[in-house]
Amino acid sequence: MQSIRCQARILFSTATSSGRPIRLNLWRNVGTGTGPGPGTGIGTPGSRSRSELMRKLREWHATAFSNRFLLFTNVGISLTLSCLGDVLEQHLEIYSGEIERFDSQRTSHMAISGVTVGIICHYWYKMLDKRMPGRSMRVVAKKIVLDQLICSPVYISVFFVTLGLLEQKDKHEVWEEIKEKAWKLYAAEWTVWPAAQFINFYWIPAHYRIFYDNIISLGYDVLTSKVKHTKSHIKKIP
């Protein structure tokens, strides 16, 4: 405050001696961080830490969704949400009395199936974009049809095969489980994914497709877990 008064005296005496009026606007930048006073742009520790956090988040985001690390990001997202979907489904089953306690091994198996599915979807989307670039209605419609007719059956089959291997089932048991349960998941896909994939192929940037896909499929993952772990009526071959 003392320095501001000194500056005012100097300016006032200069204006008086020259005979020209001078407009004093010393307070214009006070508090904005660009002039004298307490707001000199240093900032508080809290604001500096928030700025640093946001900078690190932007760097992490740019790295995670870069071409170099996109596969690992997509697999991690699929693993996490497959795991979360099973956790939600198991808690619903406990609440409704279908199961007595939480099965962590079941959740770990669902998480591993998310890894295989994440890899398939990553390369599937890359192939579609390479073979059919663009976002016209014609291109988007083709992608949706191919996704439903090719990728969905492959994804569902790989899901059951992966879990069959983890559960140490033989080929007959896995095949019978696919015949008994896969059609339920495939029918559910036709009610959800055509509309969801229109948004995905038309609006969503390519590097966010798996992320969007997994957010939408969180509810579907709950259904997937429920269908997979419903007691089947498969008879073992002696």
Image: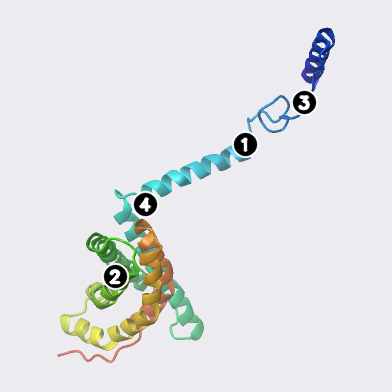
Q: Amino acid at mark 1?
A: Pro
Residue positioned 21% across, 81% down in the render: 174
Measured from the top left, where is residue 52 in percent x and y?
A: 52, 39
Q: What distance separates the C-alpha of mark 1 from that of mark 3?
A: 30 Å
When asked about the image quadrant of residue 167, the answer is bottom left
* 11 over 150 or under it: above or below: above
Q: Secondary structure at mark 1?
A: helix
In this view, the residue in front, 150 or 141, is: 141
Counting other residues with Cα less than 10 Å from the Cα at mark 2, is it few (<14), some (14-19), or many (20 or more)? many
Q: Amino acid at mark 3?
A: Asn
Callout in the foreground (3, 4): 3
Q: Which residue is mark 1?
A: 45
Q: Which residue is mark 4?
A: 65
Mark 3 / mark 4, whichever is N-terminal? 3
Q: Secondary structure at mark 4?
A: loop
Q: What distance separates the C-alpha of mark 4 from that of mark 2?
A: 22 Å
Left or right for 195, reference 30: left
